[in-house]
Image: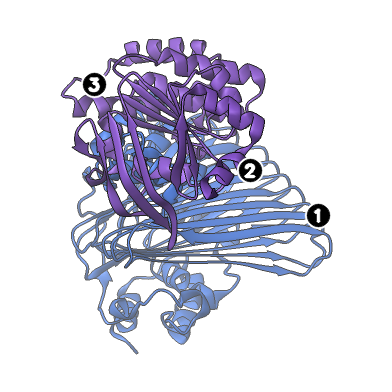
Amino acid sequence: MLEISDLTARVAGKDILNGVNLKVNAGEVHAIMGPNGSGKSTLAQVLAGREDYEVTRGTVTFEGRDLLAMRAEERARAGLFLGFQYPVEIPGVNNVYLLKAALNAKRKAAGEPEVDAYDFLALIRQKMKFMQMSEAFLSRGVNEGFSGGEKKRNEVLQMLVLEPKLAILDETDSGLDIDALKVVSKGVNSLRDPKRAVVLVTHYQRLLDYVIPDQVHVLSGGRIVKSGDKSLAQELERRGYDWVMGAQVA
Amino acid sequence: MNAALRSFETQWRARSPDALQPIREQAMQRFLELGLPSLRDESWRYTDLRSVAAQSFAAAACEAGGAADASELALVDAQQHATTLTMINGCPLLKADIPAIKGLEINSIRELYKQDSQALARFFEVASDADQRWLLLNTALFIDGLYLKITGPVATPIVIRHMASGDGAQAAHPRIIIDASAGASAVVIEHHIAQGDPSPLTNSHTHIALARAAQLEHYRVFASGAGATHLDSLDIHQAEDSQCRQFTITLGGGLVRSSLEARLNQRGASLDSYSLLVGHQDRHVDCVNIVTHAAPDTRSRQTARAIAGDQSRVIFNSKVIVNKGANGSDSKQSCRGLLLSPSAEIDTRPQLEIHADEVKCAHGATTGRLDPDMLFYLLSRGIDRETAQSLLVFAFLADVLTGMSMSSARSAIESALISQLPDSQILRNFR
């Protein structure tokens, strides 16, 4: 589904990614872990098409298409979803309208008719219930006045409505209490499907107790320095990132 | 003497005197002494009137046009049973069939002045004539005007359609007085519509006087084509505990210069001024607000949102003056500008002049481009770029739009805005 080869990128003149290689197959959940500043969020943003992040080398294919040649909105419509680490507040743009427009943009790109207004509201209500979100959400601006946890739930809600083929969740677990973490994990797990893939960017292992990854990668200094199965995350938790980075030097 | 001044003087000499003659004569003499404002005048430094000064103007005809126009916005809907009054080139159409409305008396300024000049004299006093030269000209040359006396709560909105009809070699001087008695309340919408390209120069003036605890929501809406030149001034005088909510909405016109001068004369007077200024193509929008806190415990809020695209230029200057002794004054100025094109320009300048000790005055002004984080967020959800930009523009204006209590006016203004933004169809479905 996703194949990243020798990807390098710079932000504001500084090299952040230094040759990332990663292959994610349909049906898989991958976790990308790493210390602060290792390039995790940059990788997520580059994959989603952030324009001020400059790709200097490498290729990325998404379902056989050249992802880097697509604009951010085209990537989204093709089925790529980024859950933001810090979802921006957009007062004056209603949550529900945004969701509806996003869904319709995707449907239009797939040659499908626009979603019926009644069906759409029913769908939103069902997903909101699943995510244990309050009705007040419906009338508010995008992320406006949301707590950190509410913003993350909103990201997962959007993901559930848009049903992406590939979801990249950038530290969706950070700042969540244990109940919220369970709800968010439930949301992510509900999307697991042989036709979809999920990339979890995370700092901590605790999310991986609830969303069991098929593979775990450690990103350090802008490249993947170690990959393994879920036991790698547990080992990292026990021994710290210095252990991998030390191993890299050795 | 420039061509415009000469032509106004010619008009002045040609007209036959009426009951207002002494006031008019004084104003005309002062106007001829001062001449037209130019870039050298502080409050006119952003608006170049040389092309206006170089033209000769004839009086625009009262009877011309006045029919419905495509640019006219449906600011009220039928269920609201609004009282609609039409002014054509500054001449009120006072038909006998205007139904009587409780709490509202509608009169011709000229007729009323003939009957009782003392009753109207105070509405013709000019505080700072150097800044109000166009008002002096209006006083000298206005043909007639509307005097609206609000005597109690008026349940239905009052709409004044200002039609400018004719050609660019003509000028009109519409004049409105809104006089609200103690405890009275009303919504008044002034809608400026210009026909013809170019259409007559419109030099309009509105005077609002609010007595104790009177409440007024006032709109002035400019939504004309690129051939329109509007010079509009608005004076507001507020007594004890009166409340005024004022909306200045500029969606169109080639050159629109609007001023607001408010005086909070007694304790408890409160003004909320909202300005929504939209520049596109090569339009020029200049908005000047001066709010004077002349008594203790008065309150003012100014919220201005300006957007400028293409080669347009939008200016918003606001000034709050707190007079000596006006302790407990509370004012806020918030001006934000959004540039949509590299060749557009926005100038905002909030100013404070404080002569009292205990006051609460805040001001802030920012001008920038669309927030790249917000834009990326919308794009990453599959929203196409033009729609995303329009949505963010809309969101930017929300602080003004949500302040409107007239949902019909808000909806009409939103629709007009949307039609000026890219990818309007998608946005229309979006609301």
Q: Quadrant location of the N terminus of chain A? A: top left
- Amino acid at the residue labelled 1: Gly
Question: What label sits on residue A114 in the rendered view?
Answer: 3
Kindly identify which chain the residue marked by label 2 belongs to.
B
Please indicate whether residue B321 sits to the left or right of residue A227 in the image: right
Q: Which chain is blue?
A: B
Question: What label sits on residue A126 in the rendered view?
Answer: none
Q: Nearer the viewer, residue B364 or B228?
A: B364
- Distance (Cα) linking label 3 and label 2: 54 Å
**What is the x, y in percent for residue B315?**
45, 66
Please indicate whether residue B395 sits to the left or right of residue B58 in the image: right
Question: What label sits on residue B328 in the rendered view?
Answer: 1
Residue B296 visible, this angle: yes
Q: Residue at x 34, y 70 (%)?
A: B16
Please indicate whether residue B210 sits to the left or right of residue A128 in the image: right
Image coloring type: by chain
Kindly identify which chain the residue marked by label 3 belongs to.
A
Question: What label sits on residue B181 in the rendered view?
Answer: 2
- Amino acid at the residue labelled 3: Glu
Q: Are marks 3 and 2 on the same chain?
A: no
Q: Residue furthest left?
A: A111
